[in-house]
Image (tube, grey):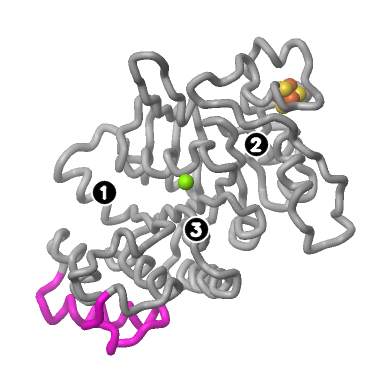
Amino acid sequence: MSTLLEVKGLKKYYGTRKEVVKAVDDVSFAVQEGETLGIVGESGCGKSTTGRAILRLIEPTEGEVFFQGQLLTSLKGDALRKARRDLQIVFQDPYASLNPRMTIGSILEEPLKVHGIGNASERKAKVNKLLQTVGLTEAHFDRYPHEFSGGQRQRIGIARALITQPKLIIADEPVSALDVSIQSQILNLMKDLQEEFQLTYLFISHDLSVVRHISDRVGVMYLGRLVELAPKKGMYETPLHPYTQALLSAVPHPNPSEKRERIVLTGDVPSPANPPSGCAFHTRCQACMDVCKTERPALKETADGHFVACHLY
Ligand code: SF4
Ligand code: MG
């Protein structure tokens, strides 16, 4: 497998006169072609900001993003637009991003027009084929977003992301707004599409069970930092970071032999405007040592492909 996406030292700081909010604070990871890398963490941990900064939907404060070896963070205008053909996003609530006055057909045709792909009849044929691929029909071409259910809208959101035949999809909480029964339909659709079109996913979610279902590797974020990164099996069976251990202790296990004692985290998540010194988790960590209060732990490899940022290791 080759590396498709590489994120190096990514930072997104928001400054106000009084304080600096470190939404993403020095995050590095790589995504291999054809894999699904899940990114989990509680709301406000910076996972969505990371996804948007990679796509340059928001400008990173610092850091580099390489996509297919090309430095995305230096691209402008046409070059950036061209790169975006290969790099798409699926949002949590597609409804909010679907123009209510446009038909599904014209919504899906729009990216093709922007990128100058095909003539009118070729575009229409492409859209109709894709509608079927995502489980909708040609009859939906002339319908409007409000006529669809939540699950169908997410199928439309996925189709819109796929229409330019991208290599990488950043999916930001794509099933979080859906009923559990619909969630698995959409996740299975995403898996089928991945196989059919050799897609690579960066899958962002607060839901550890959903991430487990779809990912090959998993990264855990806390307060703008990546604290653990590992193959799925290692992450779910032998989590190393005390924060990951606490998160996982709270989810029901598909395999009862994995059941571990519930670790209850005390205290609120500190504000990213004023993150704790040293290890950002030290205010809530039961294993906290003196060094944790002053020195930020680096993300280090402890076993084959299992990385953790914690002074215990
Ligand atoms: Fe806990 Fe220290 Fe590890 Fe942070 S570095 S998670 S405070 S043991
Ligand atoms: Mg989010």
What amino acid is labelled 1 in the image?
Ala
- Is the stretch drawn in magenta largely helix, strand or loop? helix
Left/right of residue 64 with respect to residue 239 in the rendered view: left
Q: What is the spatial separation of the Cα atoms under label 3 and label 1, in whole angstroms?
A: 18 Å
Q: Nearer the viewer, residue 303 or 178?
A: 178
Q: Residue at x 39, y 25 (%)?
A: 13
Q: CA distance from mark 2 to mark 3?
A: 21 Å
Q: Residues within 10 Å of mark 2 (few under 14, many from 20)?
A: many
Residue 83: image tag: 1
Magenta region, residue range? 118-144
Question: Label 2 belongs to which residue?
Answer: 228
Residue position for label 3: 34
- Residue displayed at 71% across by 35% down: 243
- Say if mark 1 contacts mark 2, CB within 8 Å: no
Say if 266 sits above or below 154 in the image. Answer: above
Check the image and report above or below for 83 versus 255. above
